[in-house]
Amino acid sequence: MAKVPKSRLVTGAANIDLALSMLPVAVANRIAKPALKTFASVLAQGMRKALPAATTPGHTNQNIKKVIGSAGVKKYAGRTLAAKAGVNVGKASRSVVRAFAPHAHLYAMGTLARVQNKTGRSTGTMPANPFVRVGARAVEARARNRMFETFRKRWAKEVPKLMQKAGVKKLKSAIGGIL
């Protein structure tokens, strides 16, 4: 069984959890996946905006911006879904990384003192650049709002279909009061 990765958690979404728990798993996933993808993509946009300008003459930060992305939703044990955003994340960045910014993760996380094996010469250290955390925090509220908005739209689309299939005319007040 796969472990759920430890990363930024979406908190304050107990009402979404409660609402989804009342639905069949397939319907709940069709509602939750787009909402989580929206959340991750807004976080990635914030990270790109927080990336500082290059200070070395003749260099830009465009290559690193290309490899900041978001990945789709992955299913873990049971009903746990997760989406992620960051450096070297997502399908497009896998091919782009090799060509444009294979060093992007070093720029974001920094390095310890490094020494060349053959010569023993020090190649120095690279301090961590906190643009990933700074960008994510800057847009977290907007990302959460967009996630809830997407959730409500998907809920409005999926639940009536489920009710029609089940022959139910009205939502139970418990479900209707959640959102």
Image (spheres, rainbow, N blue to C red):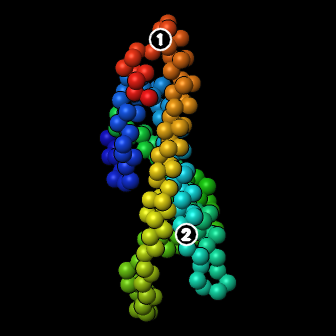
Q: CA distance from mark 2 to mark 1?
A: 49 Å
Say which amino acid is labelled 2.
Answer: Leu
In the image, 76 versus 158, the foreground residue is 158
Q: Which mark is residue 170?
A: 1
- Mark 2 secondary-structure assignment: loop
Quadrant location of the C terminus in the rendered image: top left
Q: Which residue is located at x 64 percent, y 80 percent?
A: 59
Q: Which residue is located at x 46 percent, y 73 percent?
A: 129
Looking at the image, is mark 2 or mark 1 nearer the viewer? 1
Say which amino acid is labelled 1.
Answer: Lys
Residue for badge 2: 51
Q: Position of residue 4 (x, y in %)?
A: 34, 46
Depicted 46 relative to depicted 9: above or below? below
Using the rendered view, name the quadrant where residue 2 is placed: top left
Depicted 114 relative to depicted 84: above or below? below
Depicted 153 relative to depicted 133: above or below? above
Relative horizontal placement of residue 14, taking residue 163 as reference (left or right): left
